[in-house]
Amino acid sequence: MWITDASADALVVARSNLAGIGRAATRVSAVEGSWFEALPEELHGTIDLIVSNPPYVAISDEVEDVVRDWEPMSALFSGEDGLDDIRKIVTGAATWLRPGGTLVLEMAPEQVPVVLELANACGLTGGMSYPDLAGRPRAVVARRSN
């Protein structure tokens, strides 16, 4: 299992959390870098599952003060439409996943149709959205074709 994050501070927290799960943590590599750039090339085309809750807030969107004061801006905002990071992940998943591999992404409800269309355009199939606890579309799941 691989964990990537562009934030060294976030990886410190991730490694601390991993230390609490004992022996299973020895099978997890946490590496610093932006999305797929952090992964060794030999993983290209072999990944079974990609799960991400990437930044997906548009720069112009308002966020609650408690969120803005607590979260790093890089963990929230992703370009003019909030989709810069999601675009990188979806397009990368189309080649980093093994045939039949699965992508799971969280996003804002209004982004779901755009992401489903992007996934399809990138050759990912079976795209479906899933609701959050309030019943709003919140996650997209798609697979790389066999």
Image (tube, helix red, strand yellow):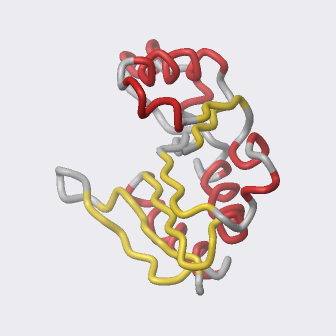
In the picture as drawn, the residue positioned furthest to the bottom comes out as 146
> Depth check: 117 or 45 in front?
45
Q: At which x and y percent is residue 90? A: 63, 63
User: Along the horizontal axis of the image, is 104 left or right of 81?
Assistant: left
Quadrant of res 130? bottom left
In the picture as drawn, the residue positioned furthest to the front comes out as 23
Q: Residue at x 53, y 45 (%)?
A: 56
In the picture as drawn, the residue positioned furthest to the right comes out as 41
- Circle count: 0
Q: Residue at x 82, y 53 (%)?
A: 41
Q: Residue at x 50, y 38 (%)?
A: 61
Quarter the N terminus occupies: top right
> Depth check: 18 or 12 in front?
18
Residue 66, compared with residue 108, is above or below; it is above
Residue 11, compared with residue 77, is above or below; it is above
Q: At which x and y percent is residue 4? A: 63, 37
> Depth check: 20 or 130 in front?
20
Residue 81, compared with residue 72, is above or below; it is below
Q: At which x and y percent is residue 8? A: 66, 19
Q: Residue at x 35, y 56 (%)?
A: 138
Quarter the C terminus occupies: bottom right
User: Along the horizontal axis of the image, is 40 left or right of 7?
Assistant: right
